[in-house]
Amino acid sequence: MNKTESQILSFIEQYLEEHDYSPSVAEIMLGIGYKSRGSVHAYIETLVGKGLLLREPGRNRGLSLPEKPKIPLLGRIAAGMPIEAIPESESLDFYERLNCPGLYQLIVSGDSMIDAGICDGDSVLIQPAQSAPNGAIVVALIDGENATLKRIYQRDGRVTLKAENPAYAPQHYPPERVQIQGVLFCLARFYR
């Protein structure tokens, strides 16, 4: 999902929560600052095609969100010494946990963050941000062109982007060359 699709989906979710009915295309345009009804309509169609929105034919305000499935939480598992297996009957709502405005996903390419548990092919969810504390894992844009996922340290008038793999040397830049675009929110790895 690109940034505009994410903005539109977030706007529609918030609007539905506040009004109990969906916004019109004109209201979506105003809400996200777009001037083209056709572009907004095309984005809505893309979201419907991806299954992220539902449309009720013949209704002007017929957009709705698909029901978000919950994954059953069956208990806890030891990663150290074994523990007693006691079944639980709760469910875990990942959508609720991931309900963060503007959240976007990137696929990791390379092994520079492997010691932080981030491997080539992993999916990382990024929370948009323009600043981050020292030691945070960030998406950093260098010279307005090249993006990288690294730990950031800002001190003594310079920015250091540090890999989590000893094979890669830290990169040092003057602050004006580095723009933080987001902070790591969570990591997903699929084995199937």
Image (tube, rainbow, N blue to C red):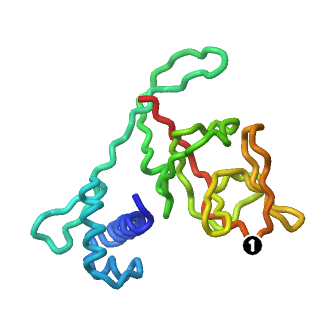
Between 145 and 160, the one lying in front of the other is 145
Q: Which residue in the structure is indicated by mark 1?
A: 176
Q: Quadrant of the N terminus?
A: bottom left
Mark 1 lies on a secondary structure that is helix
- x and y percent of residue 88 in the render? 45, 27
Looking at the image, how many numbered discs can be counted on the residues? 1
Q: Nearer the viewer, residue 148 or 79?
A: 148
Q: Residue at x 31, y 72 (%)?
A: 19
Q: Can you tell which quarter of the image residue 143 is in?
A: bottom right
Asked where in the image residue 6 lies, by quadrant, the reply is bottom left
Q: Position of residue 182 (x, y in %)?
A: 61, 60
The residue at the point 34 percent across, 68 percent down is 12
Instruction: State whether residue 170 is above or below residue 27.
Output: above
- Residue 116, how many percent across, how many down? 68, 39
The residue shown at (19%, 62%) is 55
Q: Residues within 10 Å of mark 1 (few under 14, many from 20)?
A: few
Q: Residue furthest left?
A: 58
Q: Quadrant of residue 44?
A: bottom left
Residue 80's place in the image compared with 124, above or below, is above
Left or right: 172 in relation to 27: right
Looking at the image, which residue is at 80% across and 67% down? Answer: 174
Circle 1: residue type: Glu
